Each structure stands twice: as structure tokens, then as C-alpha cells.
Image (cartoon, rainbow, N blue to C red):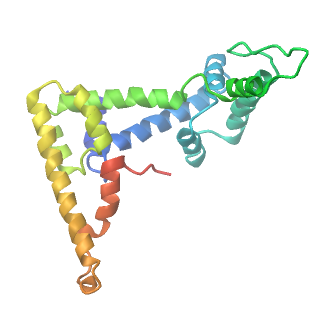
């Protein structure tokens, strides 16, 4: 019986863009939503957030834009982080020994060193760490389920994996047949996209503009998605 992850992959293959990108964002959104709902006052999670200076740029603003945490939760977390940073700047609790203020003023190098200690996160964004686990699970399940015709057909009918996820998927492939299947599926998609881009460029000639655009009209957006990963939902 297919796993829950396999079912989610099959569903994501019916949507535009890389199915792994889709499941990644949903996994991170669930993580942030759960953490803000259950763990804002958890000492363990707050310790981790102090060490990471909260979330990376992408996941902090994802939480804000998707309303995965409320203003109070963000205020509690980031006030705690600022308190920690200010304590380190003043020579308080610090993960790295800060030179004690001598009778003479600190040199420029010492002053900058103290500031760098305070301003540099000691751990990764916790949402990024969770994302790594989600990605490994998805790609492991995909590589395993490509033995089944249902998953192969679904991937063939989809827009395919973006190149970053296709590259990562190779680490989970266990047989030559699966590797060849991935190569065949994606070579065909890349060649078709290449041709559509050529047609889009051709039709942008002012003498041909009246022909209008078909499927190739958004090929440039799909090319960006294929090479870099699907655009994040806001």
C-alpha cells in the first residue's frame, strides 16, 4: 500500500511546477504553524531560536506572509533574540569568551570581534533543518515508488522535478533502471521546453507577432522554475 508521502506526491504531480517543491513548502508551513501554536514558550525551542537568531530570511517572511504565526508570537521570539544579542554585546552571557574590558579602550579588531560574536548565529534556521528532513523523506519515497507504474506515469504527466531536486534525487536512486527512467522523463521535458523557448523567441519578431502565442507563451516562466525551483507561494 502506498505511503502517505507517496499519495501526496501523486497529488502534487497533478499541479503545475516541481512536485517536490510543492511538498517542501507545505511541510515547512505545517512545521511553522505547529511550532507557533504549541512551542512559542518552550524553553528548548527558544534556546534553539536564540542560537539561530530566529529564522532565515525566507522562512521568517513565509511565516509572516502565510500568517503561520501571530504578531504576539513573533514579538516574544524576537524580543528574546534581541535581549540575547544585547547581552553578548555588553559582555554578558556569550557562547564564545569575550575579552574583558581592560584599563585601555578595546582596539578596533577587538571591538569588531565582539560585535561579530554577537551578530553571528551559532545554529541554522530551525525551519531549514526541518526542510532538509522533509526533502530527504520525499525524495527517498519518490525513488522507491518509481518502481511502480502509477508513480512513473504521474511524474511523466507532471512538469517534472526542478534541476536542484532532480540532482538531489540521484542520491536516493538504488538501481540503474530508476536512474534511466528519471533521465528519460526529464530529457524529454527539457528538450520540449527548449523548443518552446525557441518558438517564443521566434514569435517575438515584430513581423511574426500577429501569430499569437500558444503553450510557449509562459515557457520562460517554466524555464526559470525548472532551473531554479518552483516559485514560492505567498
Q: Quadrant of residue 77?
A: top right
Q: Where does the image place residue 92, in percent across and percent down from the top left?
A: 80, 17
Residue at image coords 28%, 63%: 219
Q: Quadrant of residue 41?
A: top right
Residue at image coords 27%, 44%: 161
Q: Is residue 149 above or below residue 41?
A: below
Residue at image coords 70%, 41%: 71
Task: Looking at the picture, tell me which residue is in the foreground, 15 or 161.
Answer: 161
Q: Where does the image place residue 152, in percent across and percent down from the top left?
A: 15, 40
Residue at image coords 66%, 17%: 43
From where the camera sits, is residue 148 visible? no
Q: Is residue 33 left or right of residue 174?
A: right
- In which quadrant of the rendered image does the N terminus lie? top left
Q: Quadrant of residue 27?
A: top left
How many numbered discs sit on the rendered protein?
0
Q: Where does the image place residue 12, in percent across and percent down from the top left?
A: 30, 44
Q: Is residue 182 left or right of residue 228?
A: left
Q: Is residue 10 above or below residue 127?
A: below
Task: Looking at the picture, tell me which residue is in the foreground, 138 or 94.
Answer: 94
Please identify the residue farthest to the left as the structure is shown.
177
From where the camera sits, is residue 9 visible? yes
Q: Where does the image place residue 86, in percent across and percent down from the top left?
A: 79, 27
Q: Is residue 14 above or below residue 32?
A: below
Amino acid at each position: 500500500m502506498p505511503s502517505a508521502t507517496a499519495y501526496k506526491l501523486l497529488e502534487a504531480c497533478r499541479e503545475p511546477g516541481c512536485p517536490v517543491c510543492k511538498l517542501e513548502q507545505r511541510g515547512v508551513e505545517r512545521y511553522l504553524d505547529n511550532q507557533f501554536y504549541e512551542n512559542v514558550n518552550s524553553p528548548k525551542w527558544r534556546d534553539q531560536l536564540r542560537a539561530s537568531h530566529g529564522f532565515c530570511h525566507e522562512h521568517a517572511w513565509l511565516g509572516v506572509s502565510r500568517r503561520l504565526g501571530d504578531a504576539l508570537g513573533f514579538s516574544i521570539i524576537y524580543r528574546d533574540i534581541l535581549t540575547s544579542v544585547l547581552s553578548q554585546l555588553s559582555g554578558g552571557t556569550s557562547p564564545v569568551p569575550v575579552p574583558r574590558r581592560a584599563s585601555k579602550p578595546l582596539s578596533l579588531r577587538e571591538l569588531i570581534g565582539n560585535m561579530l560574536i554577537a551578530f553571528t548565529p551559532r545554529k541554522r534556521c530551525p525551519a531549514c533543518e526541518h526542510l532538509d528532513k522533509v526533502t530527504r523523506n520525499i525524495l527517498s519515497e519518490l525513488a522507491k515508488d518509481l518502481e511502480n507504474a502509477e508513480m512513473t506515469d504521474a511524474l511523466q504527466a507532471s512538469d517534472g522535478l526542478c534541476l536542484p531536486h532532480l540532482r538531489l534525487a540521484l542520491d536516493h536512486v538504488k538501481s540503474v533502471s530508476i536512474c534511466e527512467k528519471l533521465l528519460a522523463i526529464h530529457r524529454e521535458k527539457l528538450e520540449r521546453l527548449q523548443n518552446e523557448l525557441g518558438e517564443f523567441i521566434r514569435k517575438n519578431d515584430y513581423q511574426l507577432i500577429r501569430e499569437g502565442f500558444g503553450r510557449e507563451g509562459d515557457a520562460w516562466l517554466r524555464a526559470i522554475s525548472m532551473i531554479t525551483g518552483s516559485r514560492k507561494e505567498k
